[in-house]
Amino acid sequence: MPVTSDRNSRPAASAEPRGGQALKIVSPEHQEVYRSLRNYPLFDGIPNEDLQEAIASGELALQTFWRDEIVADGPTLREKGASIYLVRSGQVAVAVFPPEVLERERQDYMPLAIEEKQKKVRAHGPLIKLAEKNLATFGEGEIYNSEAIPAADADRCAFYCVSPCELLVFSKARIGAFTSRFDFFAKRLRRAVEVARDRLQGIAGIKQEILDFYVRHGLSVAETLRVRQIDRCIECMECEKACETRYGHKRLTLKGPRLGMLDFVFACRTCTDQRCLSPCNYDSIKFDSKRREVVINEATCTGCAACANACPYGSIEMVELEAPKEKLFKIRLEKDGSLKFGEGAGRKVAATKIASKCDHCATHGDQACITHCPTGAIIEIKPGELFQDRGEVARMAARSGFDQTVMLDAGGMLPSAPYSKGLGITDGASAKIKHRRINPAILWGVGLGTFLLALVEIVLRVWKPALSLQYASLRLAGLEPEIARLKVNFKPGCDFAVWLGYIGTGLMTVALLFPLWKRSRLMQKIGSSAAWFDWHLVGGTVGPLYIILHSAMKLDNWVSVAYWSMIMIVVSGVVGRYLRTQVPEMLHGREMEELEHEREMAKLRGVMPAAVAALDRELMSFRQAAMRVAAKAGFLGAFLWTVADDLKRPMRWLRRKIALAKATNVPANVTKATRRSLEKHAGMLMLLERRRILVPRTQGVLLHWKQVHVWFTFVMSAISIVHIVVALTYSM
């Protein structure tokens, strides 16, 4: 929120030197620096001659850096002194590195000319992955000081380019001269520093882990992300199968880098710097600026693997054309004419390998993986929507020349909730997808609503016949009240029971159609996989409820086998769906929560060292006991241990509370709230440790639910068909 502004009071920028003086800048390089500065409102009002003098003296320069190039580190700082950097384009990160990594960079990479760096494929991978911890990033328009390197890590810390960068570099002395002479510039610079400082201070605790993940896996320079919501995924692998069906070779792979409840699947993210393009000597991989997509020309690809080697994220695969499993891939290429070679063709000799990568189905109206996902687990999302690092605030402030004080909400930076609780996105986000889907709430509402109406009618027929719809219809037909009351009934085989059977059978038949969706083009035209899965859930749940009413609980013949099979199908389906959503949350989402509790314990360790040390011993003892259970017990043993631990928890909590109350050497400013916070974090860490033991064993149950679900479906279907045929035969 803007608080103050100096826009109206700042002097106008002079386009030409005052007094008719000649320009001091003569070289094209100096002229480029001058034009760059004049494009930034930050420097509006500073006389041309002052800027020109700074440029001519070398105290103000425009420097170009290639990706993975170190901009400043401890030795550079000691040798050349501190500098102020303004990011004109690209992204700079600051990170802590192992000493040997920085030493290798100084010897093997930094001496190369920028042209050599552009062609060189790094043997050890990008710096984002080599860092011990990425601490912060700086984007377009942001200002940072090279002296911001932490003193404790001066020899292991460095600023480096995540993507190709252009940086305006100022000497500290020249910036000091500008701020002392021009009050308006001093105010702007102060605001720029405050924005950067607020962003850096906001990156602490769990947010630091999120930012490191964001940078380390190349997400900060991605244009789009393919994300799997683990809590919605049932691991049917339909996304991979659909991609393979469309292209002959799957272009995405699940179980990529994972942060809590989100899996960043292995698929092309369309990096802003497209490091896969430059190594190709055959111009077979290009960036389509219209579609904003990197595409491979399969008709000219020679299979040299240069692009695959240059991609640090494993998004490009080299497909062996003669491999038996790649038969469909080869057939597609032959059909497209992409395997031709010789005179007039795209390649001189026959290819044995072809590069393959996700192009987000650029030539199709939908993305196959998202369309075929039955639960909406696979989504396409922009990095900024997920990792809200508030960099856009800094860019907006820079475009205005930092002419206003900006209040930055540090608490909203890099929120952890999406990773610990899930995103809850169900519609495929911004990806291309066929939205043929009725709101599931409407399906459930209509299905359960009509079932409840039928149930009310049955209850009235049995207990209050005169209030039932059957009684009303008989009276309208002209029957006397007593006769009509006697004719009101509900039993197996009556018309109402038969119609309930028809409805229940119809709904369950619709539910059984879901597995056929991917094999039927007609069904695909009618609705998406998610839409049919909604019908599968509703029909498979509400349909059996109608069948229960249809049977009137008369289960004394062979047809009851189908009834109990139906019950097993429903129970296994509900349990399987529940476990598929709850187990990942307990297994993956709690990692972020555990880290949060451990960091809070670490903060309190300096306040109440003796008390926290006692709790650490208690935690260690508990973890050792849990590890013994994990090593020996199965699901039942782990479950019984958990129940026994539940009985011990109240006494353990009471002992902990008493011990904290009696703790000595506690500062006077430690409040009861601080003690309660310590109790809470210790207790939650123990609870999370229990879940770590129990949940993997629950996964064993999860692996078998589908087998139960499918086999009982066969049994129920077979007996139901026989039952329907027999019933229709006798009714004719």
Image (cartoon, rainbow, N blue to C red):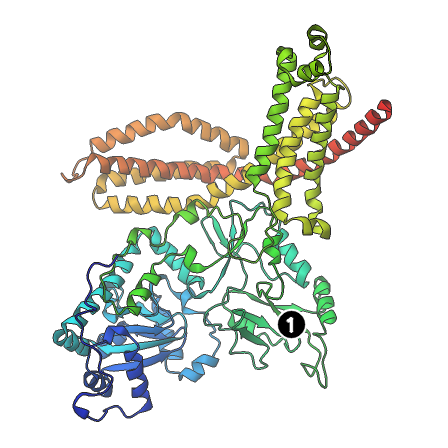
Q: Which amino acid lies under the numbered mark 1 shown in the image of this protein?
A: Ile
> Quarter-wise, where is residue 480 in the image?
top right
- The quadrant where residue 358 appears: bottom right
Instruction: Indicate the position of residue 615 as horizontal and vertical percent values.
Output: 29, 38
435, 326: nearer the viewer: 435
Rendered view: 699 above or below 453 = below
Q: Which residue is mark 1?
A: 354
- Residue 462 percent coordinates (x, y): 65, 12
Other-residue count near label 1 (Cα within 10 Å), few / some / many at <14 / 14–19 / ≥20: many
Residue placed at 66% from the left, 29% from the top?
544
Image check: 440 left or right of 18?
Answer: right
At numbered mark 1, what does the secondary structure look like: helix, strand or loop?
A: strand
Give me the residue at 62% from left, 32% from top. Answer: 541
Q: In the rendering, at what x and y percent does residue 731 appear?
A: 84, 23
Which quadrant of the rendered structure holds the N terminus?
A: bottom left
The reply to whether residue 520 is visible in this rendering is no
Residue 313 is left or right of residue 541, and the answer is left
Residue 475 makes an appearance in the image = yes
Q: Going 35% across and 40% down the picture, which residue do you hit?
A: 620
Question: Residue 722: which quarter of the image?
Answer: top right
User: Residue 526 in the image: x percent, y percent?
Assistant: 68, 49
Instruction: Please tell me whether residue 715 is drawn above or below residue 113 in the rendered image.
Output: above
How many numbered circles does the render carry? Answer: 1
Foreground residue among 697 and 720: 720
Q: Is residue 415 above or below residue 574?
A: below
> Could you tell me which quadrant the C terminus lies in?
top right
